[in-house]
Structure formats: structure tokens, C-alpha cells
Amino acid sequence: MENLFHHEIVLENKRARLEPLHIEHIPHLWPIAVHPSLWEHTSAKINSTKDFTAYIQKALDEKDSGLSYPFAVYDKQSQCFAGSTRFGNICLPHRRVEIGWTWYHPSLQRSGLNRSCKGLLLEFGFEKMGFDRIEFKTSLTNTRSQTAIQQLGATQEGILRNHMINDDGNSRDTVYFSILNNEWPSIKITKFNQDDVHNI
């Protein structure tokens, strides 16, 4: 499979633009990242600009090593940057990737922005990259995230106990979900409208 992650990837539809994350995005994203609720259920715990800069730099380092491809999310409806998301745990030999590390300004949660972004990422992952499997994971305590992932059409596969150590030193149980390539055509039709997935 061709590795398109070596290129600058911009995904865009009527609602959102996903552009490659750069260090220059920090001034736009830090005012969003200050909301503590964004990090309540994540392994990363962001409490300062130093924490956030390190978080962004780690994402960029993983991009350089081919493990991740992070995006800054611009919301066309509110005409401002809204948060971030990424492809992570990229595994080309086994044709799988994870979508996650997603956070948006609290005022834009449940606004349709997340579905638009997920549609773009899923379409690119399956139809452009040719992945066989796209994974999602979230904390067992994050029931809102679990519901949102299931509403995308993903299948819950199981719970990994004591799967991760959070930045604060606490262990977390992780719930895994996936969508397979042969499931995507039906999910695309039933779970996403044209504006969610197709580039403009």
C-alpha cells in the first residue's frame, strides 16, 4: 500500500478542515486545551502550557517516526480552530490504524463536528490508504466517548484491564472498538451523510 502519510494531507468537507498539525498551531489550540474536562478521561493530563507544548511535540515526533499523523481541526461553522485529532498506531504491514487523540472545545461537542471529522478520516483510511481495520479506544470510565464511537457504527471488541498508566500515575482500563474495510460501505451510507465524508 502506498504510504500517503509522507505527504501533507488536508481533509476537508463543508463543516471541517483537518490540516497537518504544526507547532505554530499551539497559540490557536491552547485556549481550547485549558478546559480541564477535555483531559478528565485521557491518559494525557494537561495542566500548563509546558504540558501542552510537550504533548504537541510528542505528536510531531511520532509523525516524524511514522507512528502518527496528527491534525489541527478548523471548524468552518464557527470560523475558528476547534481542537485536534489524529491517525495513530499506524501499522502499514498489517493494514491497520487507530483514530483517536481527539478533543474539541466543549462548546462544539455534540455539534456534528466530530461526526464530520470522523467521516473524513474513515473515508481517507479505507478508500485512499486501503486499511483493512480502523481502531478506536477509550477509557472504560468515558461512557460518553463509548456511546459516540458505537454511534459511528464501530463494534466493541473488549476491555483491556490495567491497559495504560495515565500521566497522573493511575492505571486505566481501555475499551477497544473497530470498523473493518468490508463494513465501511454500509456504515458510510447509514451513519454518514454526503457532507460528512466527501471532500469539497
Image (tube, rainbow, N blue to C red):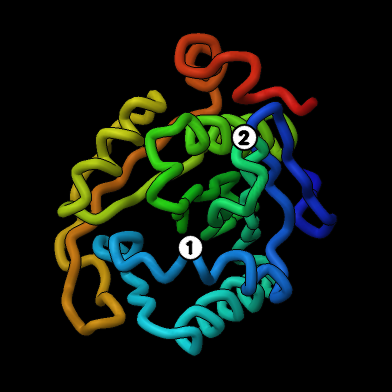
Query: Which label is found at residue 32?
Result: 1
Instruction: Find residue 90 and report its image quarter.
Output: bottom right
Percent x, y of residue 155: 32, 30
> As rendered, which of 9 and 12 lies closer to the eye?
12
Which quadrant would the C terminus be assigned to in this image? top right
Assign the N terminus to one quadrant of the image: top right
Q: Secondary structure at mark 2?
A: loop
Residue drawn at the location 62% of the way across and 34% of the way down: 77
Q: Which mark is residue 77?
A: 2
Kind of element beneath mark 1: helix
- Describe residue 94's horizontal placement relative to residue 167 as left or right: right
Left or right of 196: which side holds 47? left
Query: Disc 1 residue type?
Result: Ile
- Mark 1 or mark 2, which is nearer the start of the sequence? 1
- Looking at the rendered structure, the number of numbered marks drawn on it comes to 2
Give the residue type that dot 2 points to.
Answer: Gln
Residue toward you, 196 or 63: 196
Q: Residue at x 50, y 40 (%)?
A: 134
Q: Is residue 9 above or below residue 111?
A: below
| Residue 152 locus on image (x, y percent) | 41, 27
196 relative to 37 in the view: left or right: right
- Measured as percent of width and height from the top left, residue 188 is found at 54, 17
